[in-house]
Amino acid sequence: MNEIKKKVFEGQVALVTGAQQGIGKAIALKLASMGANVAINWYEDEKKATEVANAIEHYGQKVEIIKGDIRDLDQINRLVSYTFNRFGKINILVNNAGIYPRIPFFDVTENQWDNIIDTNLKGAFFCSQLVGRKMCDLEESCSIINISSQAISGIAKDGSVYAISKTALIGLTKSLAMELAPYRIRVNAIAPGLTDTLQPRLGLTEEEISDRANNSPLGRIVFPEEVADLAAFLASTKAEMITGQTHHINSGAYIA
């Protein structure tokens, strides 16, 4: 009799913020395809979140869609508590939710600063804190993955605050990796370059996107599914000795 091969993330639970589209969607689908049950956090587009949930159900996995503004600590608390109460644990946290408003440096207001920093950094910090506490009680390896950006290179058109927030995520990744290692919680970051999602199209024309992709060393844009493949590797036991690292996926456009 042939044995049924166990899926990589069978019996595990993943919480992915900003998972209704783009990189977050791709990661949620990838983890589900590999056996994880998934909590999808969304904020602005329930229809898209529902479509992702339906796709996950086709993989035979359990899924929940949870609205929550990760700028708000009370909503983060509800997001994490709901996920834990529904699934009983959280093995994988992907801090993906983020925004990139194109605002020239001299035009940035205090409210705009707060909005970007709270979404891109504060949300990741407190999601990690609350989920990390739950992970500490698990007698199994867990993983936190922070989605940073090639903007850590300093190249971010009209995106000084965005670059600051994504660079700070690298510091968060390193410090949490050291603090959480005794609990077998690994923390890594992914810094995607130009990726085929809506985000670059909010600030660049299709011609500009094509030119940047074609002029990169490897000559094309990054696909969100490729970022998802990397995230799945980092969450798996194949990466159990990798923590505190930033992994660049950018067609060679920026080499750290």
Image (cartoon, rainbow, N blue to C red):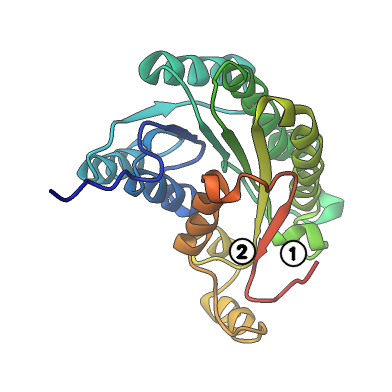
Q: Position of residue 42 (x, y in %)?
A: 45, 35
Q: Are marks 1 and 2 in contact (CB under 8 Å)?
A: yes
Determine which residue is flagged by label 1.
Answer: 157
**Secondary structure beneath disc 2?**
loop
Using residue 219 as the reference point, say whether residue 15 is left or right of it.
left
Q: Amino acid at mark 2?
A: Gly
In which quadrant of the rendered image does the C terminus lie?
bottom right
The residue lying toward the viewer, choosing from 220 and 242, is: 242
Q: Say which residue label 2 marks.
A: 203
Q: Position of residue 172 (x, y in %)?
A: 78, 37
Q: What residue lies at 57% left-to-right and 17% top-to-bottom?
A: 134
User: Is residue 221 placed above or below 120 in the rendered structure?
Assistant: below
Q: 216 or 42: nearer the eye? A: 216
Residue 211 spot, x, y in % from top left: 61, 84
**Res. 95 mark:** none
Label 1 Cα crowd, 10 Å radius (few <14 / some 14-19 / many 20+): some
The extreme right residue here reads: 106
Q: Earlier in the sequence, mark 1 or mark 2?
A: 1
Looking at the image, residue 26 lies above or below residue 136: below
Residue 42 appears in view: no
Q: Quadrant of residue 182?
A: top right
Instruction: Please state which amino acid type lies under the numbered disc 1.
Output: Lys
Vertical order, 167 against 193 (above or below): above
Mark 2 burial class by Cα count in 10 Å: few <14, some 14-19, many 20+: some
| CA separation in Å, label 1 and label 2 | 8 Å
* Element class at badge 1: loop
Q: Residue at x 28, y 48 (%)?
A: 5
Judge from the rendering whether residue 82 lies leftward or rightward of residue 191; answer left or right: left
Question: Which residue is pictured at 46% across the width and 54% down the height?
Answer: 22
* Residue 29 makes an appearance in the image: yes
